Amino acid sequence: MGSLNKVLLIGNLGKDPELRYTPDGLAILKFSIATSEYFNDKSGNKSEKTTWHNIVLFGKMAQNLANYLNKGKQVFVEGRINNRSYDDKDGNKKYISEIIATNIVLLGAKGGGGGAEAADADYGQASNDYGYAGQNGGSSANAGGTSNQPSEDDDIPF
């Protein structure tokens, strides 16, 4: 069997997304979302851990969603993890983990809008291998924290 690199997240945008274009006209939309988990610490106090995820969209999906995404908007993101490195303006090597999105669903929380609107294969789901996503290296995403909350997956028969 091969390998699997798949991510499913639901979170809220931390700020408005940034839409840019490559010199050859490919749209790239970047934003970050926060996910939170709640747990009881060693003292029994309720605690919260927030993790930030960098999201990248390409092509028509990026162009189409740029006008619908804004700070606070809740989204469902489906994609894959990509680790890459780059040199900052001072020549220092930096590492970043990103989620290359293949599907986005707008949810009806914060930031306006109700119901669910999907951006699917018609908006550039494809493989998103535009040279950008193939760069590897660097750190892995934060794992951290365990939840003492009961799992709703206990009823799943597999």
Image (cartoon, grey):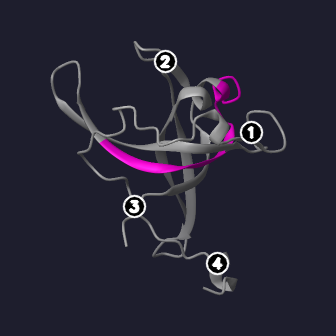
The disc labelled 4 sits on which kind of residue? Asp
Rendering coords of residue 42 (x, y %): 45, 76
Say which element carries label 1: loop
Point 29% across, 40% down: residue: 84
The residue wearing badge 1 is: 110
Mark closest to the chain's N terminus, 3 or 1? 1
Point 58% across, 64% down: residue: 38
Query: What is the C-alpha distance between the residues marked 4 and 2?
Result: 39 Å
In the rendered image of this protein, does residue 120 appear above or below residue 86?
below
Query: What is the C-alpha distance between the residues marked 4 and 1?
Result: 27 Å
Q: Which residues are magenta?
A: 64-83
Query: What is the C-alpha distance between the residues marked 2 and 3?
Result: 30 Å
Which residue ends up furthest to the right in the rendered image?
114
Say which element carries label 4: helix
CB within 8 Å, label 2 to label 3: no
Say which element carries label 3: loop
Crowd rating for badge 1 (residues with CA inside 10 Å; few <14, some 14–19, many 20+): some
Crowd rating for badge 3 (residues with CA inside 10 Å; few <14, some 14–19, many 20+): few
Q: Quadrant of the N terminus?
A: bottom left
The disc labelled 1 sits on which kind of residue? Lys
Mark closest to the chain's N terminus, 4 or 2? 2
Labels 4, 3: front one: 4
The disc labelled 2 sits on which kind of residue? Arg
Q: Quadrant of the C terminus?
A: bottom right
Crowd rating for badge 2 (residues with CA inside 10 Å; few <14, some 14–19, many 20+): some
Q: Determine whether, in the image, residue 141 is placed left or right of residue 30.
A: left
Labels 4, 2: front one: 2
The numbered dot on residue 20 is 2
Q: How many numbered marks have been drawn onto this rendered protein structure?
A: 4
The residue wearing badge 3 is: 143
The residue wearing badge 4 is: 153
Query: What is the C-alpha distance between the residues marked 3 and 1?
Result: 26 Å
